[in-house]
Amino acid sequence: MTRKTTIKTRLTSAVLAGILPAIALAALTGCRGERSRKPPRELLVDMDDQPRWNPQTKSKFFADGRTMRQPVTGTVPYGRRVANPDDYPGQEWAGFVETERASLLKEGAAEFLGLAEGVDPAKAWANLDPAIFVDRIPIEVTPALLARGQERFNIYCSACHGYQGEGGGKRRNEATQLAEEYGGMVGRRWSTGAVPTFHDPKYQPGATEKNAAGDDVLVRTGRDGYIFYVAMHGVLGPGPSPADPPVNKMPSYAHALSARDAWGIVAYIRALQLSQRATLADVPDDQRDILRAQRPGTGGGE
Ligand code: HEC
């Protein structure tokens, strides 16, 4: 080896020793955390980019012009199989899955919209005619449903309507002749006027009103389906002047209630109504003595 070559070799090694780690360092640390709109440079593309269609878009490939295919006629989607809770004895989740499934599919205008049979949901809300609403709660009323309804009512409705459904607002106290607030904590100061009491005759089941000809006609406020509707849609009323758009006199609670919850609330409102006009005769035999003992100063009368 000549001296010249030795120097050359040394130089090359020095350069390599300096440059290689620098490249490695740049490769390891470079481009970390930097955002770029440009597509990344890829040495091996693998299957990162493939031709595909976006859902719900057009395509000339198929005769019907859709990218998405329709299920083959007669296909039963997996989620529609009716699971039978009896197939899973002693397992509580099975019943729960079944009710959940029914709620997700939202089949049945009565249960999910409160509509009477044969009413077209697409046209239903045009004039809120009493006949479009179901008369009675379309699902089975059980103690569990009632308990759920009581809980949901106390959470979502009582603030304005009061725990007994007595409404809220201001009235004159006969004894002191002073104005006093009554009812729900929010309802007593609600900006659009008094919150109605559910013990008003027009909210009783099957409530009627005299029409212009003097005949009794059903009013919507007495129908279970209407109370369900109000829980889910709120109350829309005229704005401050005829030129103004309608305003929400009561907000909707659809964000917070499932259909079952709303029927539970309807059932509970019916129970509250009953509680205000029931007599001792409505109470089961074995409970009467307990109630008699609780009533102050009545001497146990009916
Ligand atoms: C923030 C206050 C507020 C809450 C909470 C509230 N309401 Fe109301 N509700 C009102 C007011 C105010 C009215 C009267 C609207 C009007 O001017 O007709 C009303 C009216 C009603 C009516 C009668 C509608 C009619 O056409 O006469 C029903 C039924 C009703 N509410 C049910 C419910 C139910 C069920 C809940 C709970 C899910 C609830 N409300 C929660 C304020 C409230």
Image (cartoon, grey):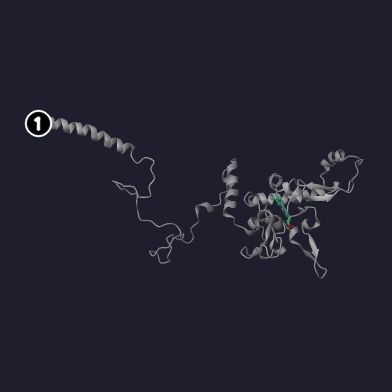
Question: Residue farthest to the bottom?
Answer: 213
Decide if residue 35 is on the left or right side of residue 177: left
Between 286 and 253, the residue placed more toward the observer is 253
The quadrant in which residue 224 appears is bottom right
Between 272 and 102, the residue placed more toward the observer is 272
Q: Tell me residue 160's x, y (percent).
A: 73, 49
The quadrant in which residue 108 appears is bottom right
Q: Tell me residue 138's x, y (percent).
A: 68, 55
Asked if the beta carbon under badge 1 is closer than 8 A to the nearest atom of ligand 1, the reply is no
Q: Quadrant for the N terminus, please.
A: top left
Taking the image as drawn, is residue 277 in sight?
Answer: no
Decide if residue 191 is on the left or right side of residue 299: left
Q: Is residue 200 above or below residue 97?
A: below
Residue found at x 63% / y 56%: 112
- Secondary structure under the numbered disc 1 in the rendered image: helix
Taking the image as drawn, is residue 25 in sight?
Answer: yes
Mark 1: few, some, or many residues within 10 Å (few <14, many ≥20)? few
Between 46 and 295, the residue placed more toward the observer is 46
Between 272 and 16, the residue placed more toward the observer is 16
Give the tally of numbered discs: 1
Residue found at x 85% / y 39%: 294
Q: Tell me residue 63's x, y (percent).
A: 40, 67
Write down the residue under mark 1.
4
Q: Is residue 244 above or below residue 282?
A: below
Residue found at x 60% / y 45%: 96
Q: Tell me residue 65's x, y (percent).
A: 42, 65
Residue type at numbered disc 1: Lys
Q: Is residue 14 above or below residue 267?
A: above
